[in-house]
Image (tube, coloured by chain):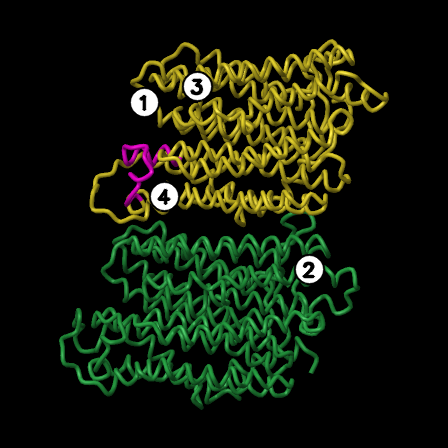
Chain colours: A yellow, B green
Amino acid sequence: MTPWLMAGLLFTPLAWAVLTLFPAFRLGRVLTRLGILAQFLVAAGLWMTVAQDGGFYYPLGGWKAPLGIELRVDGLAVTFVVLTAVVACACGWHAGDYLSPETGRHRYFWPLFWFLWAGLNGVWLGADLFNLYVGLELISLCSVGLVALAGNVGALRAAIRYLLAALLGSLAYLLGVALIYGQFGSLSLAGIQALVASAESFPGAGVGLFIMILGLALKTALFPLHGWLPPAHGIAKSPVSALLSALVVKASFYIAARLWLALGEELGSFVLAQAVGVAGALAVILGSWLAFCQSRLKQVVAYSSVAQIGYLFLLFPLTFGVPDSVVQLAQQGIALQVISHALAKAAMFLAAGNLILSVGSNRVEALAGVSRFLPFSLFSFALAGVSLMGLPPSGGFTAKWLLLQASLASGQWWWLAVLLLGGLLSAAYVFRIYRASFVESRGQDQFYHPPRVLEAIPMMLALMSLCLGFVSEPVLAVMSLPFEEGG
Amino acid sequence: MASGALLPVFALMTSLLASLIIFTLPEDRGRVRTLVNIGAALIKLALVAVMIRGVAIGQEYLLAFDMLPGVEFVLRADALAMLFAGLSALLWLLTTIYAIGYLEASPNRSRFFGFFSLCVASTMGIALAGNLFTFFIFYEMLTLSTYPLVVHRGTPKALRAGRNYLIYTLTGGAVLLLGIVCLHGLVGDLRFQEGGHFAGAGPELRGALPWVFFLLVSGLGVKAALVPLHGWLPQAMVAPAPVSALLHAVAVVKAGAFGIVRVVFEVFGLESAQSMGLLSVLVVVASVTILYGSAMALYQVDLKRRLAFSTISQVSYIVLGLCLFGPVGAAGGLVHLVNQGIMKITLFFCAGNYAETLGAHRIDELDGAGKRMPGTSVAFTIAAFGMIGAPPLAGFITKWMLGIGALAEGMDWVVGVLILSSVLNAAYFLPILHRLWFRERTTPWPKEYRWGRLETSVWLFWPPLMTAVMTMAIGVFAAMPFSPLAWVILIVSREVAL
């Protein structure tokens, strides 16, 4: 059973990417929807396997490392595989109705979408540094292509900027990989971890780790390296923005987090951990403030991503030099934050896309009266906002709760202030949108109604992020499942 | 056990489901909406009544599961929960009836009633929450679901009030969350428990607990409108009258006060809170709030604003009662949770009636309204006398219990506060009554509507009269079983070993 699931997980996206390369938009849509269903079932199946039997290492084609490619399928990886399946399903389905079939270039959405999915799965399951690099590059190139799909001058400019930032980040990462390889002669993360634990000092390895994290931070748009993100996410088509904000930035963060958790204790330093945390805190505060100041709806959502990404980097200080129980709290909190932000942000971008379609303008003030005409999309937007604000019962709330507990238990109380203030600031920008929609104006009485399915998808995502809080316990239980060696 | 665990969930679900159904109803399906609204309110009232009977004979309704490792979600029906749940179920029914009439021809009714039901669901959750974590979930849900009601009219004034409401309540929520997390960090997950948890707390806890108490109470104090955290309340008056009625009588303000009751009684425990010296600070804050609210009410010319300041003052009676450190004072405070709710909702219903029927918003526009709207004015008069504390009305019971409680504990100055406050109450209510009954109308009403036979619409006419009758009944039949006072004495006997 397991070999079939693994094969399905990695090769369906690649096969579908090739399949959808040539047909027109409509045929591509039909093919993709079939593939989406298959892929979703495979992801769910793998999740159930892991939930039942625990995690395992899986050598591709039976070739073990160091010769072959070995995948690590643990609770965390499989949770992210399922998350990707859910969000990609939603965005792919939404895109089929959202993108106009008449525009020729839109047919390239499908192959890019599938390559992106393959890259993401590769990153979640990758067990060695070089494979992670390959996955990361695949993701970056597809994302740039997807941004450029919008087709206008602004989009091309944003895409080029994104491309340069992403390449710079990848190169920095590759440089770090080279340094680490030179030091240890191994690329497998578990292998390096074992080597680090066994010997005393490694001149240069710390620099390697630092450079890798720096490159990954650039790709994750950590403040102050966030400049490329808002233009790219703001100008892309809504389903694309949703994919990018929900999943793509998480991939580079995921690698950074795995590196840090494996090597940080030995190769990192307190100053580095705190510095990353401070950058995250600044991202939370300034990102939220900038989101509040934006006059265009999708820019608000894009800057909100900058802020929400900031929370993720609190993982670094909260797992360095603290007891194991705190490390676990922080890990769980961050993982929940990743999941709930992915669901909520995807919902928010898709809902924002509907609102923009409906009022025909990207400006926040144009939303006046929309609460009467498009309550469903607005409600999805607001529910997603609840999760971003970290208010109960959403997944964002349980994540925040765990992080608050972790900061308190680690004695690093200053992060408490960041977490609470960040919640209030995000309330400010979410409610600004909501408030604009409550304004009663006589101006516009004609609104376009998007098709039902476009309204239903963000609502489902938003409800999932909202209800995540109630099922946090079982989700976390699967996430913390350990490996069993071999496969 | 199975049915016992599900009853609280059902009580919560009725309004949650009602809200979902209403959100999906098209704007023009008024009759279905009315049916769903009133049906859900009746079902909920019945469920709560069943639970009240069960709790009275000592049955336990409990639902608990882990939401996070080591953090529970608990719904539990105990005597204190039923006091609040009973109040909100009863007043929800009346307010729904009133709101249907009030909003008859206005736009966005689906949105309004959807959030209205959501708001009541949160109130129910607050009542039934079995630990601080669960309490916080519904406390924040209440904030979110009342915002759309406050800004319902969409005018710049309403939006401004809504913004201030959010700034106050969300900040308060963050402080509360901080307090809860700190408490959790100190002692882990604590269910509410009669008598509290810290009776035998060691010195290492006693250093930190006052700070936690401060955080919790200042977070809750925002909604309870303790001075100086009350700024949002008078502004929130721009909301439609049924919303104001609900906000002041059961939902928001009461949620804060109820939270303080839970923290003092069932987290800290009355005795340990007293022995740590926490209550003597709170009693001063409560007294200041009582006098400040009453004094400010004197200066208001807008009827609803005057009522708002009166709420600030009256809700602090509840807090004051807790701080008297005696069973009698505690009973007085708790019974005011119900008494104030019923009296204040009457006053707001009446204010809404004057505004909707006569177009009168300011107090000086009410001259001679008694003759034009006798039913409403009688209700208003009864409730106003109740607030002043005239026997045998509901408010008298409160003040009597508080006064005796204060004397029993040797806090004589509190009696002075009570008397001064009653004088102020009279000073701001009696002029209104004078205008209603003893002034002649010389000019036409600002904006009059005719409804046929009755003085106002049927939907608007009966709810205030019913609550006015209740105001009298609570006072007169205070000694009967299942009266609020009897129930409160049951609670207090379980909280404090008499």
**Callout 2, which amino acid?**
Leu
- Mark identifier at residue A146: 3
Residue B285, percent from left and from top: 55, 71
Q: Which chain is disc 4 placed on? A: A
The Cα–Cα distance between marks 4 and 2, rounded to whole angstroms, is: 38 Å
Which marked residue is nearer to the observer: mark 4 or mark 2? 2
Report the magenta residues as a range: A351-370
Describe residue B448's horizontal placement relative to residue B244 as left or right.
left
The Cα–Cα distance between marks 3 and 1, rounded to whole angstroms, is: 15 Å
For the point 40% across and 21% down, the residue is A30
**Callout 4, which amino acid?**
Phe
The residue that label 2 is drawn on is: B190
Viewer-nearest residue: B166 or B9: B166
Secondary element under disc 1, as helix, strand or loop, is: loop
Which marked residue is nearer to the observer: mark 2 or mark 1? 2
Q: Which chain is disc 1 placed on? A: A
